[in-house]
Amino acid sequence: MQKLIPIVNSYRQLLNEVDSWFITCLQVGGSNLSCRSGCRACCRALFDITLLDAWLLKEAFADLALNVQSQVLDRCQLRLPEIHERWPELGPPYLLNALPEEEWLFTSEEDLTPCPLLDEHGYCLVYAARPLTCRLHGLPNVDVSGEDFDGTVCTLHTGNPLDLPEEVLRWRFREVFAKEVGLFQSFSRELTGNVWTELDTFIPLALLADYADVDWHNLKL
């Protein structure tokens, strides 16, 4: 696992760059933008994250107090009956890629179940290790070329993020997403011995899975 460390650290640096862009947008947008610490409107439902994101989550989760870990895992367990009913074949390490993609690549607007990693005040317990999608949600992801990688805007904003100056809003998303893919491929090669383009899971499943017990080099999906 030592070979994973520089890859994971490079990914952390990439996430920090995303945070810097997001913070700049909020500073310029001011009160017209609603994304603020403690807002948890989008921290709900089941949504897919990469195994690399899950790896960072589990590292940060392991540093939480044991009683807090227990509370989080109890909340994760509450999601299992629904998941098993929908996908009875899905078992540890709970990777989604053996399932038809159209069945899990979604976020239900009706699913209001909070993320299990929120504390009683609605703050993320592992904020510094949150997945990439959590860092990008709420603002449009417009590349420097003008290509919009998301196409959605949070309805809680009192203003329109698309009114931000182009030099602030537009960012090098295509480059960043390409780097993410490259880092994930390097991560999967070191972890499994094979290059995977996708290995995904849900946050509750990632926290319940015992990655130390997985024979990654014989991973079959």
Image (spheres, grey):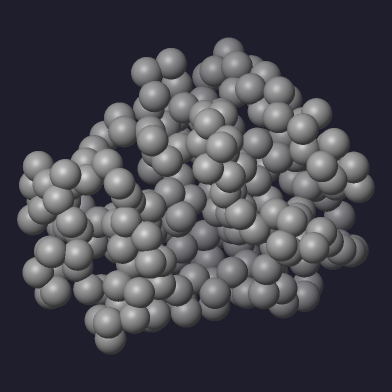
Quadrant in which residue 73 is drawn:
top right
Q: Is residue 59 left or right of residue 74?
A: left
Q: Residue at x 60, y 17 (%)?
A: 71
As rendered, which of 106 and 4 lies closer to the eye? Answer: 106
In the image, residue 108 sits, relative to residue 141, either above or below, namely: above
Quadrant in which residue 213 is drawn:
top right
Q: Is residue 40 left or right of residue 11?
A: left
Residue extending furthest bottom?
145
Q: Is residue 172 visible?
A: no
Q: Residue at x 73, y 25 (%)?
A: 77
Q: Residue at x 71, y 73 (%)?
A: 196
Q: Is residue 86 left or right of residue 157?
A: right
Q: Residue at x 30, y 30 (%)?
A: 38
In which quadrant will I find the C terminus? Answer: bottom right
Residue 88 position, x and y percent, is 90, 42
Residue extending furthest top?
67
In which quadrant will I find the N terminus? Answer: bottom right
Residue 50 position, x and y percent, is 61, 58
As rendered, which of 212 and 57 lies closer to the eye? Answer: 57
How many numbered dots are placed on residues in this image?
Answer: 0
Residue 45 position, x and y percent, is 57, 38
In the image, residue 118 sits, relative to residue 56, either above or below, namely: above
Q: Is residue 88 left or right of residue 162?
A: right
Residue 110 position, x and y percent, is 56, 37
Quadrant in which residue 183 is drawn:
bottom right
